[in-house]
Image (spheres, rainbow, N blue to C red):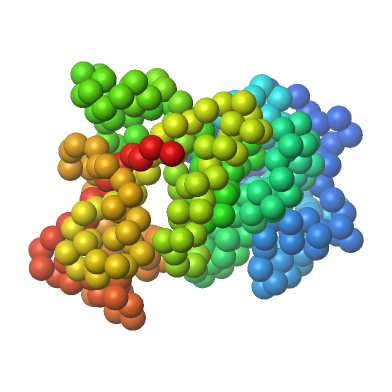
């Protein structure tokens, strides 16, 4: 199957591990074509993407290998939810696979897994507004995939699979991933002696919410403040866990942005909320071009200069500068 659909060596290894998981009783519980529009709406799919997904909705004409691929993806979600695994796990990207059915198999597998995730939400009393916002991130990333690659697919299955392990919740403008302090991206957390100076809640191994910014829309300062204001209480109320600190690892925290943007800009206000972890961080140009210019190539000469942010990012590169991914923290 891997060779027939050119799924790649990484997927081969992933499937070998997934092949040992239990087969869902009764087969893959994928909704029928009649129920599909409602499920795709639940996942936040835009009309164009939903229409194309409906055109290729799995049926009896699909090769048995692709049904097995979706079944294995569903089995991984089911096993992770049953075991309560919330940590980051890799899902190989199939975004460059030529066969659109194989490329979108993960979307269909996740559609089948929605009831599993809803049962977890029921158990913890997660409000409908939070469920809907969290699930709709799937559709946003389908849109983002089309913007980058020009066709239907879901590039970062690893990211969206986190939602389906009940490992991420969207509260207004921001998303939160329960974790523990330690290595944040490519930047180490303060050394133990430094963390002790900052407070016990900042020591290695302590609970933390990793903060993520949902794609689309301005980073409105009031919306950011409202989201931060409810985060700690949400997890305390629904999960019985206290997270006094949030961290963010992003190119948006590169302090050199403040040299180009107005003091009152949303991005600068966002930066001012965080205390940066010491160090230089990781190279950030790839993230800048992916998230701002929707490009997998770092190509300043082809990038548009439509907004103040775009011009700032490109002017800094033109002057010989670089952008870095930095980690910052704040108390909730």
Quadrant showing the N terminus: top right
At 56% from the left and 65% from the top, the residue drawn is 143
Left or right side of 129 for 328: left
Position of residue 75 in the picture relative to residue 174 (left or right): right
Name the foreground residue: 286 vs 175: 175
From what the image shows, is residue 274 above or below residue 315? above
**Is residue 165 at least partly visible in the picture?**
no
- Which quadrant would residue 331 be assigned to in this image? top left
Q: List x then y, in percent, for residue 63.
A: 76, 49
**Where in the figure is residue 103, as x and y percent of width and height?**
61, 54
Residue 326 picture location, percent across and down: 27, 45
Q: Residue at x 62, y 50 (%)?
A: 134
State the image coordinates of residue 113 (x, y, percent, origin top left): 74, 42
Question: 317 or 76: nearer the eye?
Answer: 317
**Which picture quadrant has residue 259?**
bottom left
* Picture layout, residue 307 above or below residue 85: below
The quadrant of the rendering that contains the C terminus is top left
Q: Residue drawn at (58%, 49%), measured in percent from left and top? A: 170
Q: From this viewpoint, is residue 271 visible? A: yes
């Amino acid at each position: 199957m891997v060779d027939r659909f050119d799924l790649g060596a990484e997927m081969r290894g992933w499937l070998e591990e997934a092949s040992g998981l239990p087969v869902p009783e009764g087969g893959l519980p994928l909704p029928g074509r009649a129920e599909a529009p409602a499920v795709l709406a639940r996942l936040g799919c835009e009309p164009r993407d939903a229409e194309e997904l409906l055109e290729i909705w799995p049926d009896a004409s699909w090769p048995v290998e692709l049904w097995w691929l979706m079944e294995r993806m569903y089995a991984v979600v089911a096993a992770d939810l049953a075991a309560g695994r919330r940590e980051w796990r890799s899902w190989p990207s199939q975004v460059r696979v030529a066969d659109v059915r194989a490329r979108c198999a993960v979307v269909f597998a996740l559609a089948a897994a929605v009831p599993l995730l809803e049962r977890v939400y029921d158990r913890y009393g997660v409000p409908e507004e939070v469920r809907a916002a969290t699930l709709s991130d799937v559709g946003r990333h389908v849109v983002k995939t089309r913007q980058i690659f020009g066709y239907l697919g879901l590039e970062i299955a690893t990211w969206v699979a986190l939602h389906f392990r009940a490992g991420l919740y969207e509260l207004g403008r921001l998303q939160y991933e329960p974790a523990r302090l330690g290595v944040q991206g490519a930047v180490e957390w303060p050394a133990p002696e430094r963390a002790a100076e900052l407070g016990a809640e900042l020591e290695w191994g302590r609970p933390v919410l990793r903060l993520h910014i949902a794609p689309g829309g301005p980073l409105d300062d009031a919306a950011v403040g409202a989201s931060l204001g409810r985060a700690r209480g949400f997890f305390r109320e629904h999960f019985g866990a206290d997270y006094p600190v949030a961290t963010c690892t992003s190119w948006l925290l590169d302090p050199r942005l403040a040299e180009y943007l107005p003091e009152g800009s949303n991005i600068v206000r966002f930066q001012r909320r965080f205390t940066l972890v010491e160090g230089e961080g990781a190279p950030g140009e790839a993230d800048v071009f992916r998230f701002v210019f929707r490009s997998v190539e770092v190509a300043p000469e082809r990038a548009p200069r439509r907004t103040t942010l775009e011009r700032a990012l490109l002017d800094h590169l033109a002057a010989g500068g670089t952008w870095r991914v930095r980690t910052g923290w704040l108390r909730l």
